[in-house]
Image (cartoon, coloured by chain):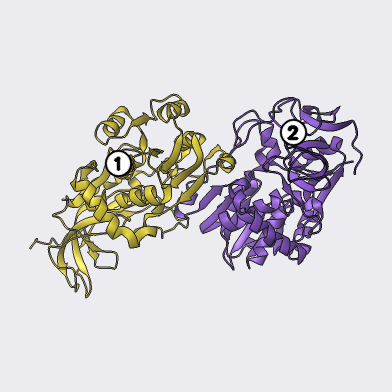
Chain colours: A yellow, B purple
Amino acid sequence: MTAIPKSYRRVVLVNRPPGEPAESDFRVEEVAMPEPRHGEVLVKVHYLSLDPYQRGRMREAASYAAAVGLGEVMTGGIVGEVVKSSHPVFKEGDIVEDRLGWQEYAIGGGATMRRVDPSLAPISTANGVLGMPGMTAYFGLLDVGQPKTGETIVVSAASGAVGQVVGQIGKIMGCRVVGIAGGAKKCGFVTGELGFDACLDYKAEKDLDAALRAACPNGIDVYFDNVGGEISDAVLRNINFFGRVALCGSISQYNAASPPMGPRLLGTFVGKRVNLRGFIVTDFAERYAPARRQMGEWVRSGRIKYREDVVQGIDKAPRAFIGMLRGENFGKMLVKMG
Amino acid sequence: MTAIPKSYRRVVLVNRPPGEPAESDFRVEEVAMPEPRHGEVLVKVHYLSLDPYQRGRMREAASYAAAVGLGEVMTGGIVGEVVKSSHPVFKEGDIVEDRLGWQEYAIGGGATMRRVDPSLAPISTANGVLGMPGMTAYFGLLDVGQPKTGETIVVSAASGAVGQVVGQIGKIMGCRVVGIAGGAKKCGFVTGELGFDACLDYKAEKDLDAALRAACPNGIDVYFDNVGGEISDAVLRNINFFGRVALCGSISQYNAASPPMGPRLLGTFVGKRVNLRGFIVTDFAERYAPARRQMGEWVRSGRIKYREDVVQGIDKAPRAFIGMLRGENFGKMLVKMG
């Protein structure tokens, strides 16, 4: 049994920045270790998942989920170990996954907690390829994007937690897959390691429209959008008739204080019969189990690879999060505790 | 048998205006009467339909349909009478409907020509409520918008050829229907004659967002978009979770020389799971016959009313068309010949 300290550290939100967050918008604080009550467990966090959606939780504005209150622990998925249990199902030593926040220890045991089998894959994947980002890629591409063999898929933030999985599933489906990422290193990884057919470096391309036309000689049938903004403008100008757009995220806009302006494109979607659909991974929650089995097979057989970007220590979370919103991470962003 | 003159008038495109068209972009010319060859008919046009999509045909840029060539007859749907036939099916006296262009007489007999039964409704409706605009409203609302009883539908250009039908079908489906139109006269017609629950005058409303919130206390579930631009921005800012947007047209943008700018809204569709889909009525062509029967029943029983805006004489077509793009028409825009 793991020795449990008397206190632990957590990160709370102390300010709602209108634009880019600063480290001073967060506070790392040390608090007394709680005791699990009846039906609860105490979880020692091993990995905290940093994901772009968490930026939305910092806003007061209504969203599909409640905002983090000032002084409250930041929202985030974790994977960790049950170190004390008053729960009928979860017992000490269980590895579990849940959205318990930016903290070293947490009280869990609610309906969304699930047990992770550490013999199947490294437990960090429960926050990545076999967790929320992997499910987002799986359902967003297959259910919303509906790619058919031989079609061309473009995915933005291609080396990120979701993008890397989208492209690899696209290859399994027999599609041409073109990624968009920032920098030669990320693009080289996406084509060299993950097997995408091409990857465009949006920081280096002077004319992304022309680069997309060259990389997608048959046009673009499915766009999996993680970024929004000018990158998406270029993709959407080149979308095919009856193209599908899986609206997953708009990371380029998350730090915008007011809605930025861009070219009006809705009118171009009429004649092209483009179908755009926003989605949230939890819409597919009742189908997670079979999807996770399929993803697990693909990961174990090496058909789906993944890359993590791991920083050490809860106090590094704010800086890593700010960097991720700038695209500085390279792979699924995780904080390893202790 | 109708006497056939030796010549007739038609309107050809002579210039491709980047912005708003002028009458000088068209030429009314008199040409010799053609003779139908084997398998063809000569049609005396009774009504020409002026529709916003025709603006797109004036552009050289690729669209879902070919551009009108310079010196060629403008595209447009007509309803008229077969006055000479070398066709195995259509005979003299038949009332027919087809897309034969802005002209007083035309050669027809192709696969898209259909016979109109003048005993069912005034033949002008073959260009309106029982024709392309009616089918656009029917499939756009029911198939793309998928309204459910009790939901709220907003339709822009509410008194136009398509909008007036959308709203009335919405009422038949048991929805709350809110129109948007320009001017008190149009709004009064839409609520007073057509039975919409409310109509917002976008020319008079200082804060369309607030007016929409007041008129749609349960939010907006379905938006049938005929106009694009700032009106659509306001509607889309107030769309509900799992809202559906039928992208039918963008008349506010058709005269724009370059893509205008507007607020970036795609990111807001993610968490709200909004589904936007462009469509063209001909996608549903194989289902026109039963839809037209249903629409015919509704028209005959008085459940669907319609309003036409008719100008007299082919030479008036360019001016009427330019006015329609400005929203000056009140109801389905038609040119009556002779």
Which of these two is toward me, B133 or B247?
B133
Which of these two is toward me, A64 or A294?
A294
Is the residue A71 above or below the residue B70 in the image? below
Is the residue A109 above or below the residue B250 in the image? below
Q: Residues within 10 Å of mark 1 (few under 14, many from 20)?
A: many
Side of B137 relative to A76 (left or right): right
- What chain does mark 2 sit on? B
Which of these two is toward me, A174 or A331?
A174
Q: CA distance from mark 1 to mark 2?
A: 48 Å
For marks 1 and 2, give the one nearer the viewer.
2
In the picture, the disc for residue B15 is none
Rendering coords of residue A242 (x, y %)? 51, 43
Under circle 2, the secondary element is loop
Rendering coords of residue A205 (x, y %)? 41, 25
Q: Residue flagged by tag 2: what amino acid is it?
A: Met
Q: In percent of the image, x 74 and y 33: which residue is there?
A: B74
Q: Which residue is mark 1?
A: A168
Pick the quarter of the image with the C terminus of chain B.
Answer: top right
Q: Which residue is mark 2?
A: B74
Q: Kindly indicate whether the residues beneath marks 1 and 2 are on one polypeptide chain.
A: no
Q: Residue flagged by tag 1: what amino acid is it?
A: Gln
Q: Kindly give the residue lying farthest to the left in the view shown.
A: A1
Rendering coords of residue B228 (x, y %)? 63, 45
Residue B33: tell me if it is visible: yes
